[in-house]
Amino acid sequence: MGSLALYQFSTSPFCAKIRKILDFKGVDYRIVEVDYLERKELLAASGQIMAPALTLETGETIADSDRIAERLDELYPSPTIFPPEMRGIHLALARYFDTELEDALFRAAIPEEIAHYARQGRDREAFYRLIRERKYGGGFCDDAIRRHAELLDIANRKLSPLDDALRDRAFLLGRIGYGDFALYGQLIYLTIGGENKISPDLPNLRAFHDRMERISATLDPNA
């Protein structure tokens, strides 16, 4: 049996969350970067077109980041991402990060995402714009570009309470868990293109991001 295969879009926060969980658990895996326009390999593996999807050594393929995370914790229980008596809280935190917080950070990252797909070709950029404007209305992308500074400020204000929560601890609830991985995933929106746009006024959150970046199976995340 070979290693696991993670089908991803590199700028997706949900894919970033699963990558980091795999790193944390020390699981051998390979990344399959999905073509944003064609998605042939993803469709063949999972029967659908949304990433992330993870193919296990058994050949089973799971889609949806929550389902993947829970399955990984079943298969590789140590180290756990659901500390005892904290499972429900971590699931609730992750749900908030992956919905309400995601909406604010996603809007702030529109210029960087458009630039990312433009580098892959005009057809990829056009498809990205088409998908977003079908959901949010005509002119959505250009409006987000015009309002970039304002939307980035809104995103950082959404993050401010989390900076306070991390003032005296390394992770949100003290011990690392699923909520931390979900938050780390969402922060990828503010690092697309290589520049960290988490506000300097949020030093605890910036330190948290750097801490999560360094996590692997060879490091003790709770040290």
Image: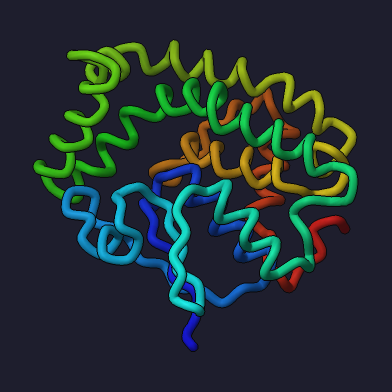
- 99 vs 138, left or right, is right
Q: Residue at x 66, y 48 (%)?
A: 210
- If the image is split into quadrants, where does the C terminus sit? bottom right
Residue at the bottom extreme, as displayed: 1
Observer-nearest of 219 and 74: 74
Give the answer, above or below, for where 216 lies relative to 187.
Answer: below
Where does residue 171 sit, x and y in percent of width and height? 80, 42
The image position of residue 80, as x and y in percent, is: 78, 59
Relative to 23, is 8 on the left or the right?
A: left
Rendering coords of residue 186 (x, y %): 54, 37
Looking at the image, residue 83 sits to the left or right of residue 67; the answer is: right
| Res 207 → quadrant | top right
**Quarter of the image where one finds residue 215:** bottom right
Q: Is residue 44 left or right of residue 198?
A: left
Residue at position x 65%, y 36% in the image:
94
Residue at (18%, 48%) from the top-left corner? 37
Which colour style is shown?
rainbow
How many numbered badges does the structure rendering display?
Answer: 0
As drawn, 203 above or below 80 = above
Q: Which of 202 and 126 lies nearest the eye of the viewer?
A: 126
Q: Position of residue 150 (x, y in %)?
A: 44, 11
Measuring 36% from the left and 51% from the top, which residue is drawn there? 9
Residue 110, above or below 19? above
